[in-house]
Image: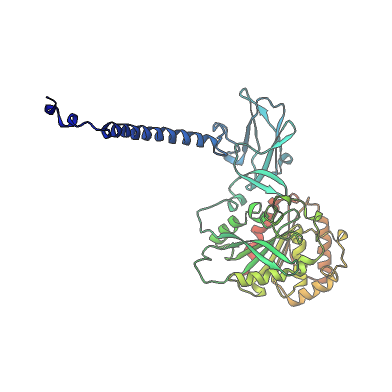
Amino acid sequence: MINELPPKLLKPTFFEPQMAFLSLTKLMNKKFLAILFTALVSIGARAQQNTGFRPGSIISPQVNEGNTVTFRLKAPVAKFVTVKGDWEADGGKGAMTKDANGVWSFTTGGLPSDMYLYTFNVDSVQLLDPTNAFVVRDVGNLFSVFFTNKGNGDYYSVKEVPHGSVSRSWYTSATFNTSRRMTVYTPPGYEESKTSYPVLYLLHGSGGDEEAWVSLGAVPRIMDNLIAEGKAEPMIVVMPNGNPSKQAAPGETKENLAYRPVMSNTLPGYKEGSYELSFKEIVDFVDKRYRTQAKKSKRAVAGLSMGGFHSLFISANHPDMFDYIGLFSPGINFKTVNMTIPAYNNLEEKLALQMKKGFQLYWMGVGTTDGLYDPLQDYKKRLDHLRFPYKYVESTRGHIWSNWRSYLLQFTPLLFKK
């Protein structure tokens, strides 16, 4: 009899098959979602930008024992490949040879300890090293980079020491009626302490900007390492933009990407004196924003090339502001400058006043093959005529970052010792 059937079958209802269907659907949905999620992750991984990894079997550059360096580039169909760097031997050039696998290679002789920039040239096309992720910009060109050790290069490398901080600050310039950017290094422990520090104002060259001394000059690493060794006093290093008509580095101004890197002598305001005469704006901002020892004996100004030119005239026009002055391969060919401009005129009188007011150090350095070597010798004669005291250093080579980093290593330990 029907009433002897199990209770579940005794009262069949519409809801039971529906619930069974829903359970099956729920299970299928879980599986479907899991499959869909896996597929999306797979597609997403493939669609993600910049995830194409190059083969890991090629190592370039490879710094070997004795600081020889081997470069490698896989270019099977290339006909001619060279490497060009900023080391001294053979003018930094090397012709690469190809093996049976289409890999070109070249090994240098032993290189002095330094930071080096280089590129490849493949059938007349300049390329970065595709296996080297470390790149720096100099004016409008990109270069691959590496270090060799057991010397200056150790100071350009990160060590296990206390580290300072690097920040970008904007200040309002009444002279230029706009906001302008600077890069500032503060020494280890600055944020945690209440200490006030001396300040080095470090100026870039033509084609540079407020980023140059950080990336090409290795300032944060140099300062960290010198301070850790007790060779330099803890100090703030201010690296302002020295191009009067530009707020900041290319890509960081209101022009955005429309402003591309160029040499400073192509820009309005180049060597017209406004930057030098208005430099107090920068000093006043720094003294207000940062914990500084706001006095002449705790300030230094130095720069390379155009920045050396700026340092000369900033210190000459503000003789009560800086006790330490550094001119690194200074761009002081006065034959190309309008010396009647207020910032530049009456130079000997300004230097005489600067000497009378007093200072601790006037430091100059240049390479013997630098195109600015002769103008600096002429300037030295003017200083000698005035009996103006200075320290002079010559190095080999020319107008290159290798010299300017080295000069900073020599100059900085002399600062703020009294």
Q: Position of residue 273 (x, y in %)?
A: 80, 66
Q: Tell me the quarter of the image containing the C terminus.
A: bottom right
Residue 360 visible in image: no
Q: Quadrant of residue 281?
A: bottom right
Number of marks in the image?
0
Q: In which quarter of the image is residue 384?
A: bottom right
Residue 316 visible in image: yes
- Vertical side of 112 occupied by 208: above or below: below
Q: Tell me the quarter of the image containing the N terminus.
A: top left
Q: Residue at x 55, y 31 (%)?
A: 57
Q: Position of residue 65 (x, y in %)?
A: 57, 39
Q: Is residue 45 left or right of residue 205?
A: left
- Vertical side of 47 occupied by 406: above or below: below
Foreground of the two, 409 or 54: 54
Coloration mode: rainbow
Q: Is residue 108 left or right of residue 40?
A: right
- Vertical side of 85 occupied by 328: above or below: below
Q: Residue at x 68, y 25 (%)?
A: 77
Q: Where is residue 127 in the image (x, y as percent from the top left)?
A: 69, 37
Q: Which residue is drawn at 56% across and 57% down?
A: 225
Foreground of the two, 194 or 365: 194
Q: Which residue lies furthest to the bottom in this view?
A: 357
